[in-house]
Image (spheres, grey):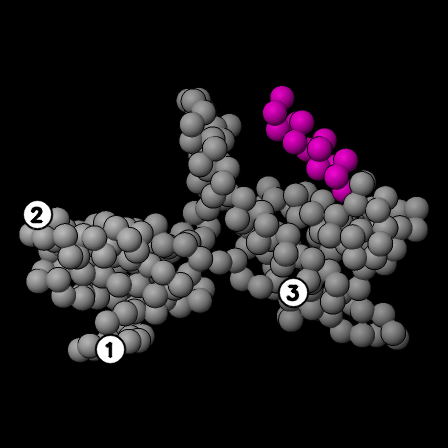
Amino acid sequence: MAVNIDNVYQKVLALANKEQRGYITPQEFNLFANQAQMEIFEQYFYDLNQFARVPGNEYVYSDIDDMLEEKLQIFDNTDGESVVDAYVGAGIGGVNKRLPDYIYRVHRVEFNNISCEILKTKDFNACRYGGPLVAPSNRRPVVNIRKNIMRCVGDDNSFITPTGVFYFKAPQVVSWGYIVVTDKALYDETTSTDFELHLSEESELIYRILALAGISIEKPNLTQMAAGLEQTKVQQEKQ
């Protein structure tokens, strides 16, 4: 389930206007909302790495690893070779394959159902030119991704096109759409785009947007209030 953008905006306005801390325009809100969404999304990967080293428990609904995996599954996708059909560079058919901008992070690449070893540029070049013992093949293909350009090598050191790409896509750009009636912005569902984040992230979005808004409108007390709410939430999660 997605997070309704109007619910978030109305709660942000209610908290920001409490004690006359300031009004946040729809344009400002949309900027802050997208920034907050990306911050939360990127934090998933750091949290997953951190909590992977902490012993879990038998209850899926309260295991942190499982909860993070559930939140990331929303963005987990798989595409066939068509995802890398855009060739750039020299060679037959083009040496390199440019990945679409909507791909945020690739976590698995396959060639004919065989997992390719994803290598850093230095290791990728060393593997290609390191001799027959380490040379890639169609049974042990290697791949390198740099600046959204993918190179995959198989038999005879030849470039090949992966048949499967598993990746996390970036969250869609959110927008609180509106129409103006008597100089007042009214929510328009038909032109709005909700957050793709898990429903449990609604409060986190509100706190982060408030903090960003406090910096923008030079209201440090608003930022402090948001930080206090965030700290309370963190303490509840650790109990």
Q: For mark 3, does the 10 Å Cα neighbourhood hold few (<14), some (14 to 19), or many (20 or more) residues?
A: many
- Identify the secondary structure beneath mark 2: loop
Q: Quadrant of residue 221?
A: top right
Amino acid type, callout 3: Ser
Mark pair 3, 2: CA separation: 53 Å
Labels 2 and 1: the sequence-earlier one: 1
Compared to residue 126, the image places residue 52 above or below, namely above
The structure residue drawn at horizontal position 25% and vertical position 50%, both measured from the top left corner, is 123
The span shown in magenta is 226-239
Q: Quadrant of the C terminus?
A: top right
Task: Tell me where residue 228 appears, x and y as whole percent.
Answer: 77, 35
Q: Identify residue for label 3.
A: 175
- Identify the secondary structure beneath mark 1: loop
Q: Are marks 3 and 1 in contact (CB under 8 Å)?
A: no
Task: Please state if 122 lies on the left or on the right of 5 as rendered.
Answer: left
Answer whether residue 2 is visible to the viewer in this image. Answer: no
